[in-house]
């Protein structure tokens, strides 16, 4: 059972700017499209990103008219002061572009977004061309999968094809993304594997595992390990 990829979730139409786009055009693009950041292209390839945070220094330092930061000022403050005098995207953009590959799994993409601490990351192919953008909201849409769809996947894919269990020998109920499993499997290890696979299914909110094993094969394994 393959996990959804970035390519299957991303937005393909990306609002972008050119490196020579004027400052005011950048503000207008963000405002008119209701976004907080956009990629900056040079010859069609992303070379930077302009966000609201990159534009705000012009107001913070009054267009560069405020006194320059001192020698001991933090580098981040010095960088914002330099951005305050910027006239084009090239002057204010942040580099390099943090990007994702189209074939990256959704869970890995979520970790990248969390690690970067940003709302969205741009998607680039092997040649470095911009092919889309993936936002936190795109990933959260996975939790909007219909309960019936999740139930079918759990019953047919997880139990039927992965665990080789008669799909109708277990009862699967899904309500608002919360899965309840009932019935009997042959071994305790199968019960644990089933829960693990269901929890890992994109769109599942929680799992109530009420499956029962005919016999506990995990106890013997643990005892053997201890005695060995």
Image (cartoon, helix red, strand yellow):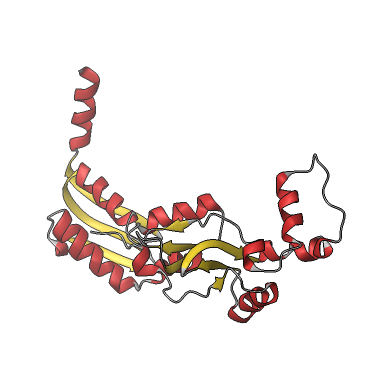
Up/down of 73 relative to 202, above or below: above
Q: Tell me what residue is drawn at x 41 percent, y 74 percent.
A: 12
Q: Tell me what residue is drawn at x 43 percent, y 73 percent.
A: 11
Up/down of 148 relative to 119, above or below: below
Return the residue nearer the eye: 87 or 191: 87
From this viewpoint, which residue is outermost toward the bottom? Answer: 32
Indicate the quadrant containing the N terminus: top left, top right, bottom left or bottom right.
Answer: bottom left
Taking the image as shown, residue 22 lies to the left or right of residue 148, namely right
Q: How many marks?
A: 0
Q: Quadrant of residue 215?
A: top left
Return the residue nearer the eye: 134 or 208: 134
Return the residue nearer the eye: 182 or 101: 101
Indicate the quadrant containing the C terminus: top left, top right, bottom left or bottom right.
Answer: top left
Q: Quadrant of residue 161?
A: bottom left
Q: Is residue 190 visible?
A: yes
Horizontal and vertical percent for residue 156? Answer: 18, 65
Q: Quadrant of residue 139?
A: bottom left
Horizontal and vertical percent for residue 15? Answer: 52, 75
Q: Tell me what residue is drawn at x 71 percent, y 52 percent.
A: 79
Q: Is residue 203 visible?
A: no
Taking the image as shown, residue 132 lies to the left or right of residue 191, namely right
From this viewpoint, which residue is outermost toward the top? Answer: 228
Taking the image as shown, residue 9 lies to the left or right of residue 181, namely right
Q: Tell me what residue is drawn at x 72 percent, y 64 percent.
A: 86
Horizontal and vertical percent for residue 27? Answer: 67, 74
């Amino acid at each position: 059972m393959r996990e959804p990829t970035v390519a299957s979730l991303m937005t393909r139409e990306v609002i972008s700017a050119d490196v020579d786009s004027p400052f005011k055009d950048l503000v207008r693009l963000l405002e008119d499209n209701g976004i907080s950041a956009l990629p900056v292209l040079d010859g069609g390839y992303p070379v930077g990103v302009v966000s609201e945070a990159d534009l705000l220094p012009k107001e913070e330092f009054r267009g560069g008219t405020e006194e320059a930061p001192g020698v001991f000022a933090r580098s981040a403050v010095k960088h914002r002061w330099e951005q305050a005098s910027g006239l084009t995207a090239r002057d204010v953009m942040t580099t390099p572009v943090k990007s994702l590959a189209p074939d990256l799994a959704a869970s890995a993409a979520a970790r990248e977004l969390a690690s970067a601490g940003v709302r969205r990351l741009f998607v680039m192919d092997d040649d470095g061309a911009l092919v889309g953008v993936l936002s936190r909201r795109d990933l959260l849409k996975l939790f909007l999968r219909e309960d019936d769809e999740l139930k079918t996947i759990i019953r047919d894919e997880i139990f039927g094809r992965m665990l080789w269990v008669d799909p109708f020998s277990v009862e699967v109920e899904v309500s608002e993304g919360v899965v309840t499993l009932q019935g009997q499997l042959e071994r305790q290890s199968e019960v644990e594997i089933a829960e693990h696979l269901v929890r890992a299914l994109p769109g599942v909110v929680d799992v109530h595992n009420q499956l029962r094993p005919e016999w506990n094969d995990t106890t013997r394994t643990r005892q053997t390990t201890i005695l060995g």
